[in-house]
């Protein structure tokens, strides 16, 4: 693959170039730029397959550079030194990224992912990505399946259910989306949200819990009627978390008052 590196820090460019030459020999560096306008010209002239793109630079952001190419013919791997909120935004937006200082194994994995797409460019919804980057807690999540990429409001997810090696997202509109990621990945994504994993096969959104029933075993009944078992060892923990959630909701100021 023919690639260019865009970063305002010369040291960062040199480090990434060294790693690519030594660990990704099938990636050829055909250009380097320290700003978005220089990068724009190199992309037009060289027509690369892949762009390693810094997020924030003094003379413009990586997002602005991508705005010059609405019909993009190259893949993008973001390279960032940003904080956990930005990283969470990338994860929620389902885009490829590397965290500085770049780890060689993560670089190899990111490049392999691009190669495995076999020329199918990653669809980046810039509006959703920017919204997630600017927010401490992203409101939308990008999930991929055989139909394409779905952008879902986190508040519209009732629960995520394990289905063999797949996961199923249940939405408030009744729609179900089947995904290839396992439940553990979504548990990690939602750890700073009001979600809880009461059972190996489910992650639930606490705002859609309708009832807890302890008769004939512990069951959580969601507001859409879905009944979810809860493991014995998690029963007390769930009740404590649910009580804290209800108290937090009740302590919020009434917007109508």
Image: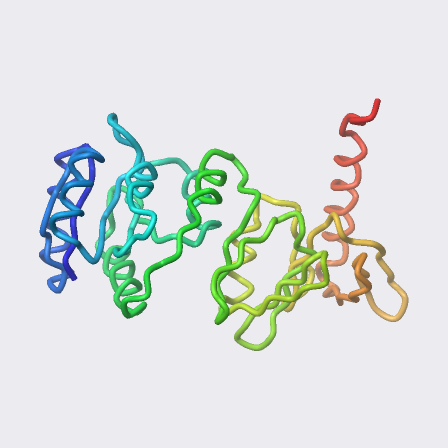
The residue that appears at 76% across and 67% down in the rendered structure is: 229
Residue pushed farthest bottom? 164
The residue that appears at 43% across and 54% down in the rendered structure is: 94
Q: Is residue 219 left or right of residue 96?
A: right
Q: Is residue 99 left or right of residue 21?
A: right
The residue that appears at 16% across and 34% down in the rendered structure is: 34
Q: Residue 192 sits in which quadrant? A: top right
Query: According to the image, what is the colour scheme of the structure?
Result: rainbow
In the image, residue 23 sits, relative to residue 77, either above or below, namely below
Q: Is residue 252 left or right of residue 30?
A: right
Residue pushed farthest top? 257
Residue 64, given in percent of the width and then of the height, sits at 32, 36
Q: Nearer the viewer, residue 239 or 132?
A: 132
Q: Quadrant of the C terminus?
A: top right
Q: Nearer the viewer, residue 137 or 173?
A: 173
In the image, residue 52 sits, relative to residue 181, either above or below, namely above
Q: Nearer the viewer, residue 225 or 102?
A: 225
Q: Nearer the viewer, residue 94 or 211?
A: 94
Q: Quadrant of the N terminus?
A: bottom left
Residue 93, given in percent of the width and then of the height, sits at 46, 50
Q: Residue 248 sits in which quadrant? A: top right
The residue that appears at 69% across and 57% down in the rendered structure is: 204
Residue 138, given in percent of the width and then of the height, sits at 53, 42
Residue 25, given in percent of the width and then of the height, sits at 11, 62
Q: How many marks?
A: 0
């Amino acid at each position: 693959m023919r690639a260019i590196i865009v970063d305002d820090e010369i040291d960062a460019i040199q480090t990434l170039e060294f790693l690519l030459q030594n660990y990704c020999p099938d990636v050829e560096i055909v250009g380097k730029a320290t700003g978005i306008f220089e990068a724009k010209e190199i992309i037009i002239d060289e027509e690369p397959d892949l762009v390693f793109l810094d997020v924030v630079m003094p003379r413009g952001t990586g997002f602005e550079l991508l705005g010059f190419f609405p019909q993009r013919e190259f893949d993008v791997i973001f390279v960032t030194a940003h904080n956990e909120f930005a990283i969470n935004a990338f994860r929620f937006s389902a885009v490829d990224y590397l965290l500085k200082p770049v780890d060689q194994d993560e670089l190899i994995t990111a490049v392999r992912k691009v190669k495995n797409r076999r020329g199918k460019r990653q669809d980046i919804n810039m509006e959703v990505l920017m919204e997630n980057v600017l927010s401490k807690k992203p409101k939308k999540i990008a999930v991929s399946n055989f139909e394409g990429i779905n952008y879902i409001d986190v508040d519209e997810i009732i629960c995520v259910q394990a289905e063999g090696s797949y996961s199923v997202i249940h939405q408030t509109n009744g729609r179900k989306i089947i995904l290839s990621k396992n439940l553990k990945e979504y548990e990690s994504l939602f750890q700073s949200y009001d979600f809880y994993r009461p059972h190996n096969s489910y992650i639930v959104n606490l705002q859609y819990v309708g009832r807890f029933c302890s008769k004939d075993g512990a069951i959580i009944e969601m507001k859409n009627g879905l009944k979810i078992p809860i493991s014995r060892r998690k029963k007390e923990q769930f009740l404590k978390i649910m009580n804290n959630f209800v108290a937090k909701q009740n302590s919020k100021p009434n917007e109508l008052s």
